[in-house]
Image (cartoon, rainbow, N blue to C red):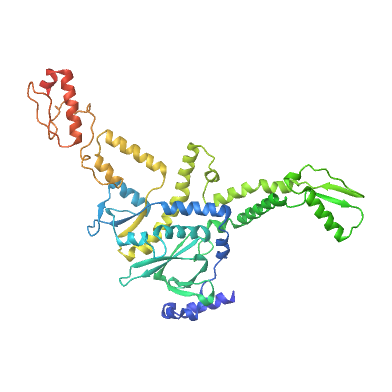
């Protein structure tokens, strides 16, 4: 378009950063959006509502944790275990030699309390919802005196226009429902979350936009089906009269017919025709019934575009099927979206506080948690780790009774006599079994030794 050519020429001729405060006089400089995002948001109904809400609510429910490279003691924190480091490296896509999980920090408070009008969870939910509908979500950051956000405001993505730049890719953002009401924001004030779009490097591509034709078809099918419930979209029959009758006679005949036969209580009333009148019933063609049968197929295509198994939305599967579908849904749909969201936060949001900070979502895949429980059980049974070491891996606080590994009684080194555990004193000949203990684990061992002495007598006591 000629307008875009003029804009491109102007961008090459001027440094937009020098006239950033004059945007109100140049509001038409925003890049043309590739689609009508307002129309996409208006399609947030019916089955689209179900699918988009499912993804947004699932994404917003995954816990987000804050980490720092290296060790830090400024804020309440704990050292990350080596097993957790591997998961962080997998999420970040690069090596992390040492990291600390920060439990309390102003960044976490900012994400938890987005602004004066909404909570952090509501902000996250709305952000993910805009990504599902338009492929674009925007945060406007109110920056304080230190350059850190004091509030996070999600912008309505259907009213945001990007101002391009030949040097910085994006020079800023224009926000407003109409051109006369637009407001300009600098790049450092806005974080743009978007789904990849091979057709446009500025605006994202949403699942809804990719499947919009099927959504419109499903909407038309729903309207047609509703019409069938209302009046079957056509009369049941036609009264044929060979001769022309006056308009008032037709209206009187129609009124008398409704009074005589309309309503379920009048079903089965006899009908008497006079003169040259005949009745012809009207049925449905195979094409009409095929439209109704294809409605489920359209819903399945929409669900596939959003990455949701259709049977997962119908609540008709068995427990085994539900677990298998949940695993695939989390692995193939939720985790890639989380990684994309993490990368933008780590690139644009976390450095505003500290260059060492980064965020990673908890692993939502159920299968991984089952593997974790099996791994923990094996390690504890074989004395590889203590309860406190396993609790640290899971992000739990240490317990006073969890410092000593649990070792089975029948496991002893070959050729080496068993040592007296710390906290025990040896029993003298003829003395009843009694020990002084340091913790609950040693109490259990002491009671086992007492029972063993009572069963085997002096021989076992001499061996000890």
- Location of residue 284 with respect to 381 vertically, above or below: below
Task: Answer with the quarter of the image where residue 219 lies.
Answer: bottom right
- Examine the rendering and report whether any part of residue 374 can be seen: yes
- Examine the rendering and report whether any part of residue 414 can be seen: no
Q: In screen coordinates, is 44 left or right of 21?
A: right
Q: In screen coordinates, is 8 left or right of 123?
A: right
Q: Position of residue 68 (x, y in %)?
A: 29, 57
Q: Looking at the picture, tell me which residue is in the foreground, 190 or 246.
A: 246
Query: How many numbered dots are placed on residues in this image?
Result: 0
- Location of residue 136 with respect to 52 vertically, above or below: below
Q: Looking at the picture, tell me which residue is in the foreground, 30 or 314.
A: 314
The quarter of the picture where the C terminus appears is top left
Q: In screen coordinates, is 402 left or right of 394?
A: left
Q: Residue drawn at (12%, 21%), measured in percent from left and top? A: 461
The quarter of the picture where the N terminus appears is bottom right
Q: Position of residue 96 (x, y in %)?
A: 30, 53
Q: Looking at the picture, tell me which residue is in the foreground, 443 or 135.
A: 443
- Location of residue 218 with respect to 376 vertically, above or below: below
Q: Position of residue 34 (x, y in %)?
A: 56, 66
Q: Residue drawn at (14%, 32%), measured in percent from left and top? A: 421
Q: Position of residue 8 (x, y in %)?
A: 52, 76
Task: Answer with the quarter of the image where residue 451 lies.
Answer: top left
């Amino acid at each position: 378009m000629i307008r875009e050519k003029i804009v491109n020429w102007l961008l090459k001729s001027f440094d937009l950063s020098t006239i950033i405060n004059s945007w109100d006089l140049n509001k038409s400089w925003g890049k043309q959006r590739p689609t009508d995002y307002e129309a996409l948001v208006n399609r947030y109904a019916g089955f689209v509502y179900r699918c988009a809400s499912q993804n947004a609510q699932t994404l917003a429910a995954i816990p987000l944790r804050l980490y720092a490279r290296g060790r830090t003691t400024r804020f309440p924190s704990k050292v990350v275990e080596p097993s957790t480091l591997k998961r962080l490296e997998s999420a970040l896509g690069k090596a992390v030699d040492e990291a600390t999980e920060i439990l309390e920090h102003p960044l976490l408070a900012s994400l938890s309390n987005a602004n004066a009008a909404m909570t952090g969870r509501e902000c996250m939910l709305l952000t993910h919802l805009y990504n599902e509908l338009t492929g674009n979500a925007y945060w406007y950051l109110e920056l304080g005196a230190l350059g850190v956000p004091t509030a996070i405001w999600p912008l309505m993505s259907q009213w945001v226009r990007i101002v391009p730049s030949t040097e910085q890719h994006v020079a800023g953002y224009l926000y407003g429902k109409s051109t006369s009401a637009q407001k300009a924001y600098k790049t450092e004030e806005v974080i743009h979350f978007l789904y990849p779009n091979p057709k446009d490097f500025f605006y994202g591509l949403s699942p809804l936009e990719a499947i919009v034709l099927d959504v419109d078809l499903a909407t038309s099918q729903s309207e047609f089906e509703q019409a069938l419930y209302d009046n079957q979209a056509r009369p049941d029959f036609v009264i044929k009269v060979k001769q022309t009758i006056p308009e008032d006679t037709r209206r009187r005949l129609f009124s008398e017919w409704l009074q005589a036969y309309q309503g379920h209580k009048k079903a089965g009333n006899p009908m008497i025709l006079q003169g040259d009148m005949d009745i012809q019933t009207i049925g449905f063609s195979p094409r009409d019934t095929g439209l109704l049968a294809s409605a489920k197929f359209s819903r399945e295509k929409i669900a596939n575009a959003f990455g949701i198994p259709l049977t997962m939305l119908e609540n008709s599967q068995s427990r085994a099927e539900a677990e298998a579908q949940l695993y695939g849904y989390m692995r193939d749909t939720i985790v890639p979206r989380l990684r994309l969201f993490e990368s933008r936060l780590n690139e644009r949001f976390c450095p505003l506080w500290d260059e060492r900070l980064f965020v990673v979502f908890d692993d939502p895949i159920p299968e991984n948690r089952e593997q974790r429980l099996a791994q923990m059980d094996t390690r504890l049974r074989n004395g590889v780790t203590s309860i406190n070491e396993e609790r640290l891996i899971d992000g739990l606080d240490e317990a006073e009774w969890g410092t000593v590994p649990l070792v089975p009684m029948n496991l002893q080194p070959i050729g080496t006599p068993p040592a007296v555990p710390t906290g025990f004193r040896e029993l003298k000949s003829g003395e009843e079994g009694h020990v002084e203990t340091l913790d609950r684990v040693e109490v259990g061992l002491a009671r086992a030794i007492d029972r063993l002495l009572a069963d085997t007598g002096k021989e076992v006591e001499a061996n000890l």
